[in-house]
Amino acid sequence: MGQTSEAIATLKTDTADTRDFYADYYAKKGVDRNSLLHNPSVLFQVLAQDAAIIRGLRSGGLDPQSAQVLDVGCGDGASLWLLLRLGFEAGNLHGVDLLESRIASARARHPLIHFDCADATRLPFDNDSFDLVMESTMFIHATDEEVAQKIAAEMIRITKPGGTLLISDWRYAKPRNRHYKAVTKERLAELFQTGALTKIHERYRGSLLPPVGRFFSRHSAWSYFAVQALFPFLTGHMVTVLKKNEQS
């Protein structure tokens, strides 16, 4: 799949901007802002997101012993660690990220998983290679739509016919913040050409909108999932399970 030097430059610029954004974010919020161990506001946000991903994986009908899996934009590999807990084989798990520092951290934390530094708009894998291709909170930061479309096209290309694509992302963006672009159902349909190349299999609600979810996680954990069920519009994170068409 070809790409222009301008698209590559945009991708690298967006990544650098995002890295700088998060450096500033943690400088202001503190290093424990998203610490599952030290910040009680995070616990149920993570539990809700993991529950949605697990339900999505279950619906995909995957065999944990044999499924070949790729996490695109894997960061330090946290999403793949969840798959290990579910019985997926480490030798069948792969992760790619553009930032070398994240890949180095991922390799150090779990050397049995295959991690590579790679450009998501030109993935180094053959067509129809994986039973499951997934991403977690990557498209919310892929604000350049040309780059996002290239990444989605690559994810489809390397998924086996009839295979599963799992999109774990935020359906709302922060107002007036250029570092975010909402991953709406309509945007996903355009990125992944639902109806033509893929079809929506299932959708699951995950974490509440951060201010709401953090509040209930810290102050009223017992009611977190009741709020999620009773007020679905307050759910910001969604897991969408797509199936690649057999004749794609």
Image: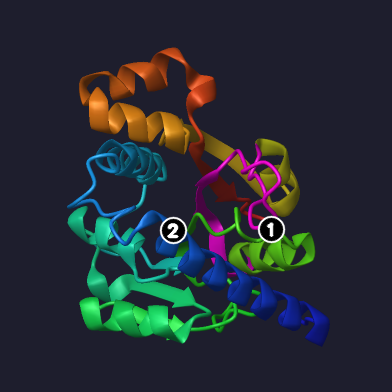
Element on which disc 1 rests: loop
For residue 126, which quarter of the picture?
bottom right
Q: Which residues are magenta?
A: 157-184
Residue 11 in the image, given as x and y percentages of width and height: 68, 75
Residue 120 in the image, given as x and y percentages of width and height: 59, 74
Q: Earlier in the sequence, mark 1 or mark 2?
A: 2
As drawn, 88 above or below 57: below
**Residue 4 in sight here:** no
Residue 116 in the image, given as x and y percentages of width and height: 43, 84
158 or 136, which is in the foreground? 136
Residue 228 lies in the magenta stretch: no
Element on which disc 2 rests: helix
Three-letter code for the amino acid on which mark 2 is drawn:
Lys
**Count of numbered circles in the view:** 2
Image quarter of the C terminus: bottom right
As drawn, 150 above or below 170: below
Q: Residue at x 55, y 64 (%)?
A: 159
Residue tagged 1 = 248
